[in-house]
Image: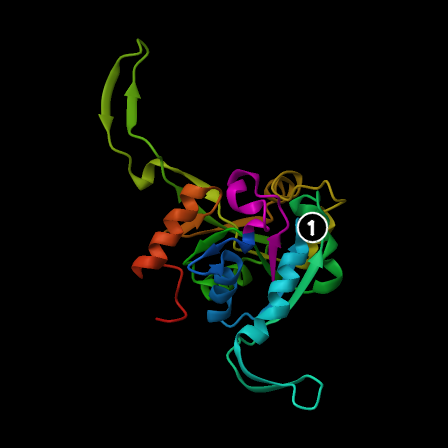
Amino acid sequence: MKVVLLAGGLGTRISEESQFKPKPMIEIGGKPILWHIMKEYSYYGFNDFVICAGYKQYVIKEWFDDYFLHNSDVTFDFKDGTKKVIIHSQHCEPWRVTVVDTGLNTMTGGRIKRIQPYIGNEPFMMTYGDGVCDVNIRDLLKFHQTHGKIATLTAVIQEQQKGVLDIGGDNAVRSFREKKATDGAMINAGYMVLNPEIFDYLDGDSCVLEQSPLQRLAEQGQLMSYTHKGFWQCMDNKREMDILEKMLAKGNAPWKKWED
């Protein structure tokens, strides 16, 4: 089963880094967050990726072009006036990576529509290239296969960032307490499983997946949610990037399973 990764946005809210590279290529722990997401899928046995690129898409292509060389033991032999490269051993993952230029200003639904020729008539997984999660992807897939609907998204609780107030009609604060995880609302965390019928809901580069397509699926009873109560963190800004960086530095990154 193929895994589609959305990696084409401008990343304007983390412009300190994204002015030089696409947001999914911003590094945490010395590797792009895109690589971390791919490692998670690979841990569960999914190694065939289609990357929807756009903004500075050449950076993604060049990184993967160099990846094999950078993870191999090699000899460069120039003795006879030519260059011979001898690969002794390589330490790469068994990945097949298709990078597709889906346009600079294309919206999320439009990007997925553009990669339809690379998917064919098969179910596929999809997530955003800027968030990590410790969801059990095998269980997510099993859940999708049991209900028979077109789409499944992973839902997580977005915690409140501030204390919780109970305010009366006279504007008097009746109670105050610190936030709890249960105070938050369920949000779409990505990590979706989609049947090929999803392409019938997508039209044109201006199509936003999270608007009309998912709304129509919900109205038709074709959209299911897989509730995940574990870790999920997006990387929309520098503060969130630092959170992920610190987790990796301390060795307690919940999504990093491949070395456990």
- Going 68% across and 83% down the picture, which residue do you hit? 83
Q: Quadrant of residue 122?
A: bottom right
Q: Quadrant of the N terminus?
A: bottom right
Find residue 136 and report its horizontal and vertical position in percent. Answer: 43, 62
Q: Is residue 198 found left or right of 146 in the rendered image?
A: right
- Going 50% across and 79% down the picture, which residue do you hit? 91
From what the image shows, is residue 14 above or below residue 118?
A: above
- Going 28% across and 35% down the picture, which residue do you hit? 179
Find residue 162 and report its horizontal and vertical position in percent. Answer: 32, 31
From what the image shows, is residue 104 above or below residue 249?
A: above
Find residue 26 and report its horizontal and vertical position in percent. Answer: 51, 53
Q: Is residue 132 visible?
A: yes
Report crowding for label 1: few under 14, some 14 to 19, many 20 or more residues within 10 A (C-alpha): many
Find residue 177 and report its horizontal and vertical position in percent. Answer: 23, 29
Q: Nearer the viewer, residue 1 or 92?
A: 92
Q: Secondary structure at mark 1?
A: helix
Q: Residue furthest bottom?
A: 80
Q: How many marks?
A: 1
Residue 15 magenta-highlighted: yes
Q: Quadrant of the C terminus?
A: bottom left
Boundaries of the magenta span = 1-23
Identify residue for label 1.
Answer: 111
Q: Residue furthest top?
A: 170
Q: Nearer the viewer, residue 137 or 150?
A: 137
Q: Is residue 231 visible?
A: no
Instruction: Specify how the rendered protein is coloured.
Output: rainbow
Amino acid beneath label 1: Arg
Residue 100 magenta-highlighted: no
- Going 52% across and 46% down the picture, which residue do you hit? 17
Q: Quadrant of residue 51?
A: bottom right
Q: Is residue 185 found left or right of 76 in the rendered image?
A: left
